[in-house]
Image (cartoon, rainbow, N blue to C red):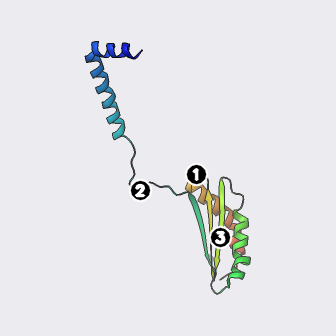
Amino acid sequence: MLPSVIRFALSQRLLVVILTLTVALMGWFAFRELPIDAYPDISTTQVQIIVKADGMPPQEVESRVTRPLETAVRGIPHQTILRSMTKYALTVITVDFEEGTDIYWARTQVGERIAPVLVELPDN
C-alpha cells in the first residue's frame, strides 16, 4: 500500500505540491479567522444581591434579611449554586447559573423574585 502511494506521489509531483500548498493556505486562513481573546471570559453567570442593614447585628440580618431573600430566589430555573454571606449590617447573596445562561434573563428572574420581599424588609 505504502509503496504504491510513494510511486504515485513521485509520478504526480505537481499535483502533490499543489495539494500541499492548498492545504497549507487553507490552514493559514483558518488560523487567521480563529477568535483569540487576550483575557477570555471564563466566569459563570452570576447575580449578586447586596443589602445594607444599618445598625443590625449579623444574627438579625441573617434572620430578617438574608433568609427571606434566599427563600425568594431559591428554585429559579438553571440555577446551580446559591450562597450567602452575612456580616454586621450587610448581606451578600450570590446566585450562580448554568453555563450559557443569558445574564439579562438571570437578572430579570432574580429581580422579579426579590421585588415582593424587598417591601417586607426592615426599613433601615
- Quarter of the image where one finds residue 19: top left
Q: Residue 39 carries which label?
A: 2
Give the structural element (helix, strand or loop) at label 1.
loop
Measure the C-alpha gap from mark 1 to mark 2: 18 Å
- Quarter of the image where one finds residue 22: top left
Residue at horizontal 40 percent and vertical 51 percent from the top? 37
User: In what quadrant of the picture does the N terminus appear?
Assistant: top left
Q: Mark 2 and 3 residues: CB-CB less than 8 Å, in contact?
A: no
Looking at the image, is 102 positioned above or below residue 27?
A: below
Q: Name the residue under label 1.
A: 99
14, 110: nearer the viewer: 14
**As drawn, is 46 to the left or to the right of 37?**
right
- Quarter of the image where one finds residue 9: top left
74, 115: nearer the viewer: 74
**As drawn, is 90 to the left or to the right of 63?**
left
User: In what quadrant of the picture does the C terminus appear?
Assistant: bottom right
Tell me which numbered mark, 2 or 3, is placed earlier along the sequence: 2
Residue at horizontal 32 percent and vertical 35 percent from the top? 28
Tell me which numbered mark, 1 or 2, is placed earlier along the sequence: 2
Measure the C-alpha gap from mark 2 to mark 3: 28 Å
Q: Which amino acid does label 2 sit on?
A: Tyr
Residue at horizontal 39 percent and vertical 48 percent from the top? 36
Q: Name the residue under label 3.
A: 84
Measure the C-alpha gap from mark 3 to mark 1: 20 Å
Give the structural element (helix, strand or loop) at label 3.
strand
| Percent x, y of residue 97 | 61, 56
Looking at the image, is 108 positioned above or below residue 88?
A: above
Looking at the image, is 114 positioned above or below residue 91?
A: above
CA neighbours of label 3 inside 10 A, class few (<14), some (14 to 19), many (20+): some
Q: What residue type is labelled 3?
A: Ser
Q: Residue most toward the front? A: 3
